[in-house]
């Protein structure tokens, strides 16, 4: 689960990481009130207005702007809230902005060349360890830095059973070319950042930029956080931070129905039991000349109700030209699944306008095939994998 910048910063602050302070606002009026409050608390009269969407590169897309007085705060907030922000990380339609973060301006006037670093803590699955990735080249596209000047990116591997050692934090500060107060500040910053990452069960904390102010403070100006969904039950307060407006509505609906679903952009919908079989089915669709429109694991209970919900969710995607059902009947008998499909189909009436190919293999597969063939419905049946692939190819023609 991804978080907004302001939510990520809340978590950081709770672990003692210094952040660029800000207040989230849903309207231009609230933005002005937020700016006034910040001025009282922080003393800076300038503010940055930052679009809160789950996408990076907001600065490039015009979603981060500096306001030098309250009137500008109002004008900028008004123009950003409600806009469809297009950044290098969004689709061409962009993402609708519902909220802005009104933050204190931390790039002090007269500070011509502020020091911006890059730092992220993430899970390195291949090593089974946490990794701190950092660079002197912050503020810009880190992918570009990695491509053109990879020697400017450093890595610090952290053994999760030991945690970040003090010498590692010092090595990071040293490699970033810091000394004196800034060095000490960076050691504190990294230590607290790692603690935030670890304690929140995250898989990513990316801070770009980390800023060194002209008076040697080190702070997080941005925060991109990905929490591990499987650990959310341990963090009820973080789970509440989920913003469904940022997520694919079809995926949200599928999740509520207890289906394991990922929306993709192909033309063949699939309904499968088991994640491994779902992957194999997607390969099969590709080899048959199609593109999978989704990944959908209906799980163990493929009864009529579940099958119907799955059909309805798959059919919400207008690109779907055919549906392939591929179920292995191990614990669940194929004839029961077949009956479920027939019932769901009848129940849905005209809602199904695309050909359906059903491949059932396992217990009572023959009976299941007969059941489908005799149903009088426009459903193609198959038992073998290849048979199913050929039928997909046929209907796509
Ligand atoms: P991103 O573009 O989505 O990664 O959003 P960031 O939060 O990283 O902001 C983009 C850029 O805005 C940063 O790299 C900074 O250069 C600039 N920026 C952020 N905060 C401030 C600020 O307080 N003052 C000024 N002048 N610029 C800022
Ligand atoms: Mn950034």
Image (spheres, helix red, strand yellow):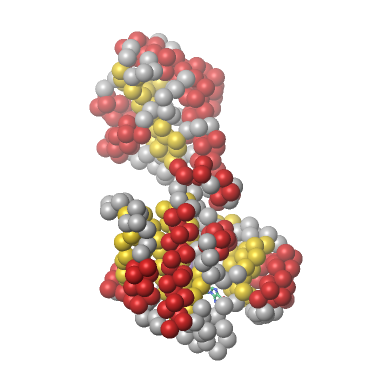
Estimate the x, y position of residue 199 in percent, counting from the top left.
47, 54
Residue nearer the viewer, 277 or 383: 277
Q: Quadrant of residue 168?
A: bottom left
Q: Quadrant of the C terminus?
A: top left
Q: Quadrant of residue 387?
A: top left
Residue nearer the viewer, 236 or 87: 236
Question: Residue at 40% of width from left, 21% of height from top?
Answer: 379
- On the question of residue 151 being in view, the answer is yes
Question: Residue at 55% of width from left, 35% of height from top?
Answer: 256
- On the question of residue 396 being in view, the answer is no
Where 108 falls versus 54 (above or below)?
Answer: below
Question: Residue at 31% of width from left, 66% of height from top?
Answer: 155
Q: Give the number of marks.
A: 0
Estimate the x, y position of residue 83 in percent, counting from the top left.
61, 61
Where 388 falls versus 128 (above or below)?
Answer: above
**Horizontal side, residue 155 vs residue 250: left or right:** left
**Horizontal side, residue 53 vs residue 76: left or right:** left
Estimate the x, y position of residue 339 in percent, counting from the top left.
44, 14
Residue nearer the viewer, 334 or 299: 299
Q: Quadrant of residue 35?
A: bottom right
């Amino acid at each position: 689960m991804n978080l907004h910048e302001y939510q990520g910063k809340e978590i950081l602050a709770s672990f003692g990481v210094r952040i660029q302070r800000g207040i989230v606002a849903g309207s231009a009026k609230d933005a002005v009130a937020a700016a006034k409050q910040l001025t009282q608390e922080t003393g800076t009269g300038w503010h940055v207005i930052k679009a809160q969407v789950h996408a990076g590169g907001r600065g490039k897309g015009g979603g981060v702007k500096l306001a030098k007085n309250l009137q500008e705060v109002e004008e900028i907030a008004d123009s950003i809230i409600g806009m469809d922000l297009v950044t290098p990380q969004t689709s061409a339609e962009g993402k609708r902005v519902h909220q802005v973060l009104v933050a204190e301006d931390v790039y002090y006037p007269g500070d011509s060349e502020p020091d911006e670093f890059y730092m992220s803590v993430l899970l390195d699955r291949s090593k089974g360890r946490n990794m701190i990735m950092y660079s002197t080249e912050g503020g810009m596209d880190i992918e570009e830095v990695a491509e053109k000047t990879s020697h400017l990116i450093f890595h610090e591997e952290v053994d999760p059973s030991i945690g970040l050692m003090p010498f590692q934090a010092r090595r990071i500060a040293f490699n970033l070319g810091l000394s004196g107060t800034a060095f000490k500040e960076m050691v504190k910053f990294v230590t607290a950042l790692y603690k935030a990452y670890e304690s929140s069960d995250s898989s990513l904390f990316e801070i770009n930029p980390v800023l060194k102010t002209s008076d040697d403070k080190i702070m997080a100006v941005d925060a991109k956080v990905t929490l591990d969904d499987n650990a959310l039950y341990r963090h009820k307060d973080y789970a509440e931070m989920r913003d469904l407006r940022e997520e694919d509505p079809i995926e949200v609906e599928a999740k509520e129905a207890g289906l394991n679903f990922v929306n993709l952009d192909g033309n063949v919908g699939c309904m499968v039991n088991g994640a491994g079989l779902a992957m194999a089915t997607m390969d099969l669709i590709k080899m048959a000349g199609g593109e999978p429109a989704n990944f959908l694991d209906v799980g163990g209970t493929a009864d009529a109700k579940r099958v119907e919900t799955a059909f309805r969710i798959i059919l919400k995607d207008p690109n779907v030209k055919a549906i392939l059902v591929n179920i292995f009947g191990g614990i669940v008998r194929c004839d029961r699944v077949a009956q479920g499909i027939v019932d769901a189909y009848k129940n849905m009436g005209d809602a199904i306008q695309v050909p359906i190919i059903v491949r059932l293999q396992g217990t009572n597969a023959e009976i299941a095939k007969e059941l489908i063939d005799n149903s009088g419905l426009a459903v193609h049946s198959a038992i073998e994998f290849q048979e199913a692939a050929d039928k997909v190819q046929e209907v796509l023609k």
